[in-house]
Each structure stands twice: as C-alpha cells, then as structure tokens.
Amino acid sequence: MSELDELMSRDPINLSSLDIDAIIAYHRKARARRASGEKPIKLAQPTVDISSISSKLISSVKPTVKIERKI
Amino acid sequence: MLDESLLTIGSTSPFLPGTSIQYAWDSTSLGLLKTCPRLYQYTLLDGWASRDESVHLRFGIEYHHALETYSKLRATGASHEYAIRSTIAETLIRTDGWLVDYNTKAGKYKNRDTLISLVVDYLDNFVDDPCETYIKSDGTAAVELSFRFELDWGPEVNNITPTPYLLCGHLDRVVRFNDHLFVLDHKTTTTTPGEYYFHSFEPHNQMTLYTIAGQIVLDAPIRGVIISAAQILLEKPHRFIRGFTYRTPGQIEEWLLDLKLHLNLAESYAEINHWPMNDTACDRFGGCKFRGVCSKDPEVRHMFLKTDFIKLLENERWNPLASR
C-alpha cells in the first residue's frame, strides 16, 4: 500500500493538516509526472458501488389522477 | 444588485398535487422533455435511472461543492493554500465510503481519487482566476445560487388553483470578466473540450435559461455563460478550457415563446397519460439509455426496465425545487 493509499483509506476526520498537505503534494507531483509523459502509479481500487446496490431495492408510486381535457 | 428574494431554499414537489403536470421546471427536466417525452417520463415521472448515472451525478455534485467551498473561502480573504487544504479536507469527509466499480468506464474516470486530483488541479490552474467572483450585497460570494422565478402563465387545469410556471436552477458562479457579468458553469467531461464541444452550447437549452436567470436574479445585463470545462484524463494532466456563449434579447424572446409551446404539450401528455417517443432522438449523445427498452414490445417493456435500471425513491428523483 502506497503512502497515498494509506492516507486515503483513513477516517478523514482524523487526518491532520499535514496529512491533507501530503495528499495535495502527491497530486501536484503526479500532475508534474504526467506532464513529463510518465505513466501514473495505479492506486488500490475498491470495486463496489454501494449506492446503486441499495437503490435496486427501491420501488415507487406513479401518479394516477385523471384529468378531462381536449387536445 | 442581486435580488435575493429570487433565491430559494428547501424542496417541495415540482408537480401539481395528484397530477403528472410539472409546474416547476429546470434545464434538466426541460431538456429531457424537449429531447423525448418518453425519456422524460421514464426519468422524471417514473424515476428509472441507470447504475452509472449515480456515479456521474455524485461526481458532479462533489466537484461543484468543492469549487463552491474554495470560492467562498477565497472571497473571505483566505490564501490559496489555506482554501485548498480546507476544500480537500471537506471533500474527503463528504466522500468517505464512496465506492465505485473501477471496471466500468464511469467508475474508472469518476471516483474519489480522480475527484481529489481534478479539484487540486483545477484550483491550482485557476489560482489567479481572471474571472472575479461577484460579491452579493451581504458580502458573500455569488456561488451556487439556487434560483426560481415565476412566468406570467401557468398550467390550465380544471379544479386546481391556478399556479404559475416556475423556472428554477442553480448558477454555479456569477463572475465579472473584462467589466462584464457572466454566469460561469462548471462541466466535467472525458472527451476533448474543443471547438465541436463548445459549439454544442449554441443553441443550448441550459445556457439560454441560465442567461435569463442571471439577468432576472441580478437585474443586470448578463451577456451569457462562460463554460468552464474540465477534461478528466488518467495518463496526462487534466485539461481546463473555458468557452463563451452569448444570447441576444431576440434569442431569449424566441426561447420563451418556444417554452410556452413545449409546456403546453407537456400538459396535454400528462392529461392523456401518454408520453410519445421521439424516435429521431434515440441516436443522440451516443445513444439513449432507454433504447433497449423502447425497442421492445410495449407489453414487455416493464420487465426490461426492472432488469436494466434501478427505480429511485420519490425523494431521490430529480427535483428542480431541491436546493443544493
């Protein structure tokens, strides 16, 4: 696990200003590396979209009032 | 001078009670209706959404929120480094536990890591932003302004108290650029924001509405919208390009006349509870997400909707009246 992965995996409430600065510094260095043509380092990747899973369990009601009007 | 009585908070239903007649419209709902009434029905009325959509929506919300946080801090006199640190700290807290499927294109480009990287790059790129944020009369920055204003006509429905149509939306930022006022709108894209990209905003439903909204809310001659496009790139630095789109008074007048006709048609569709397909729009924007449904026999479409889409709760659906 890289230093960035470790910082990103922590509870963000517990991150210090120095930790946040380290994350920002990482992205600035990554930008400079990309600009020079260097390939980016792959980060650890979680793979589940929790919001879409929970939304699958949901149903809803359709409006049903009838309105008489000529078109 | 900003008329703050036209800004809005809270959220109520955008539909007349007990009907499918929408009286509060924003650019998203209006755009769906104009593109295809059936697309509008599936999305706005029935609440069907694709799984990728939640990723795009969440990414957009967090990106906008981060830039709003930064702009507000800078408007109070905070330094770039202080404002960026606070913005990233808040964004990390807001997105804690947000997991996406990196195996999809949406998840590969739009996730927590690319969000943080895009925000850092954007803020560094525009550290000396030539667009100066407009400061409201209360001394706060004109960012993320939720607006609503009444039109002088409304739906014609029997037995329901006359209600005027409302136009609503969110202006990302109002800025002064070269002594002129503009609405500035943030866009994220994975494609190149070149000439073709910026041409797509002329004519453009959202940009015309935002020009009108800016003029009404600020009571000032807003000339148009600055589109601040951010291209998300994985192997190169993200790109940030801005383009201008202007609207003349004649174009605005024409748009409002067309709007009247579009909304009148929407009332008719709601009354007969049938939202026709615009089968010339199925190919647009790389293909409509509901094409696989609309191409099936009407009797079996509901099964394909249930299989391929998720149905959002009423309070999760797109609501033009919801404040951010």
Image (cartoon, coloured by chain):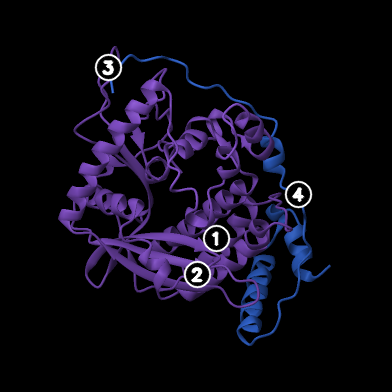
Chain colours: A blue, B purple
* Callout 2 secondary element: helix
Task: Give the residue at mark 2.
Answer: B123
Q: Residue at x 60, y 46 (%)?
A: B54
Q: CA gap, disc 1 to disc 2?
A: 10 Å
Residue B16 visible in image: no
Instruction: Depth check: give the residue in front, A4 or B243.
Output: B243
Task: Give the residue at mark 4.
Answer: A48
Q: CA gap, disc 1 to disc 4?
A: 26 Å
Label 2 crowd (10 A; few <14 / some 14-19 / many >=20): many
Task: Give the residue at mark 1.
Answer: B87
Q: CA gap, disc 1 to disc 3?
A: 45 Å
Q: CA gap, disc 2 to disc 4?
A: 29 Å
Quarter-of-image position of residue B117: bottom right
Chain-order first, disc 2 or disc 3: 2
Q: Are marks 1 and 2 in contact (CB under 8 Å)?
A: yes
Label 1 crowd (10 A; few <14 / some 14-19 / many >=20): many
Chain-order first, disc 1 or disc 2: 1
Q: Is residue B97 left or right of residue B134?
A: right
Q: Residue A55's spot in the image, x, y percent?
A: 66, 36
User: Three-letter amino acid code at disc 1?
Assistant: Thr
- From the image, state whether disc 2 or disc 4 is nearer to you: 4
Q: Residue B58's spot in the image, x, y percent?
A: 58, 49
Instruction: Depth check: give the residue in front, B158 or B126.
Output: B158
User: Three-letter amino acid code at disc 2?
Assistant: Leu
Task: Give the residue at mark 3.
Answer: B161
The answer to whether residue B88 is above or below residue B165 is: below
- From the image, state whether disc 1 or disc 4 is nearer to you: 4
Q: Give the residue at the far bottom of this rendering.
A: A36
